[in-house]
Image (cartoon, rainbow, N blue to C red):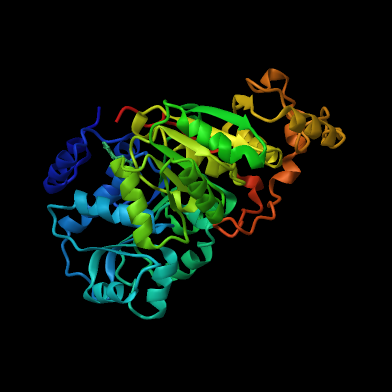
Amino acid sequence: MTSFQDLGLAAPILAALTAEGYEKPTPIQAQAIPHLLQGKDLLGIAQTGTGKTAAFALPILDRLARDRKPVPHHGCRALILSPTRELASQIAQSIRSYGRNLKLRVAVVFGGVSARPQAQELARGVDILVATPGRLIDHLDGRAVNLGHVEVFVLDEADQMLDMGFIHAIRRLVPQLPKVRQNLFFSATMPKEIGALAADLLRDPVEVSVTPVATTAERIAQKVLFVETARKRNLLVDTLRDEGMGRTLVFSRTKHGADRIVRHLEEANIPSSAIHGNKSQSQRERALADFRSGRRKILVATDIAARGIDVDGVTHVINFDLPNVPESYVHRIGRTARAGAEGSAISFCDAEERAYLRDIERLTRQTIPSEDHRLPATVAAEATARPPAKPARGGKPGGGRGQARPAGGGEGPGRSHGGQRANAGQRGKPRSDSRTEAGGQRRDGRGGEKPIGDMSFMKPARGR
Ligand code: AMP
């Protein structure tokens, strides 16, 4: 079994890892670090929870510490781009802990807070800069930062960058980097546009793939509860009152929906906090701190705000709404079962969301066990409202939107693959949902995307 010593990291870094309580490298660390220490480019297929932050942070720290140089004024030696503020500050926090014995300067810049102190810090120069793309572009436009001294460039959560519309910003930033540099590229999934971006950025990269999306899903006990939209809030209260519920993350597709859930829970005397893009930075930080410390057992979040949140011990994820992008389901439920722990995911699904459920089941290659919590009158009404079954392309009829399926245990082997394929055309169709936090964005042209389970050659990271 590889140890951190075997990887060849500098002694002050090893001391910091011991202080962190890290005993051995996670699979992505064991595989990536030796190549990164040699200066190779890397394509990492991994999501949060795999230890990927240390996988890129440790070799960067090692490189900068061994080859000490004065920090470039208005610049940095390593640049890490992250899609969200939460993730950016978590990365910076991790780098500071791993680099506690190195005296390197680390800065983090993101939007939603004043740009001036960031510009002042950048003017003095830093070793490592962690940034969200939008704010970094602002600083570039304001000439507060110059990327001409970057030796290592990390693009983290590239697929999320795409979902959040940052690809254009990234394509603007890259030409400002020196031509000779080390590139690290991380993504949980590989949609076509991300594959193209990786191909443009990386030179002869080493590829490392861990915790494939489908495998993550398999590790978590999952259940779908069919319920009318109007009854979801009461079902949530009933579910949360269950004694087995521990630290629970509730997902809402929209910011307003998240606030409504918090208000409803308050009325039911269940304290919770919300975290989403309309909250101020300090509100988000407080909500996260309360959740982390256990002061609040329930955190209601939108996909984007929750992205990359690293909170151990989340026992349950509740999808109040199903996400319209199936990969988000995997990211959501991946908030539980971190570091090898077991977890549960419960998803509420109304008639409108059946198509999303089918997309999720196809991506994760599983049938999620279901329970029917609908009123008998709804079941009858939905049965009569069901559109006449169209023959599927080359297959059996069925699989139409809103189609009921038997309660209590999924559809079993009788489930028509023809029906799934018949729905493939609906898949790319965005629900007219401009209220979603990412502006209802949905990737187009995803035909070339395949679940990364296919690309994995590793078992999921466990037992850390
Ligand atoms: P990440 O995937 O980078 O978000 O990391 C997930 C969590 O695993 C964080 O809480 C890290 O502190 C923790 N972690 C990372 N590497 C190790 C390791 N080698 N041993 C134990 N915990 C780790």
Q: In this view, does 294 lie above or below 162?
A: above
Residue 398 visible? The answer is: yes
Residue 291 percent across, percent down from the top left: 35, 44
| Screen quadrant of the C terminus | top left
Q: Which of 164 and 281 is in front in this view?
A: 281
Residue 374 percent across, percent down from the top left: 68, 30
Q: In the drawing, does residue 280 fall left or right of residue 350? A: left
Residue 27 percent across, percent down from the top left: 34, 34
Residue drawn at 37 percent across, 32 percent down: 461
Residue 35 visible? The answer is: no
Residue drawn at 31 percent across, 66 percent down: 150
Q: In which quarter of the image is ligand 1?
A: top left
Q: Nearer the viewer, residue 92 or 265?
A: 265
The picture quadrant where one finds residue 368 is top right
Total marks drawn?
A: 0
| Screen quadrant of the N terminus | top left
The picture quadrant where one finds residue 45 is top left
Q: In this view, does 382 lie above or below 429?
A: above
Q: In this view, does 109 lie above or below 291?
A: below
Q: Nearer the viewer, residue 100 or 85?
A: 85
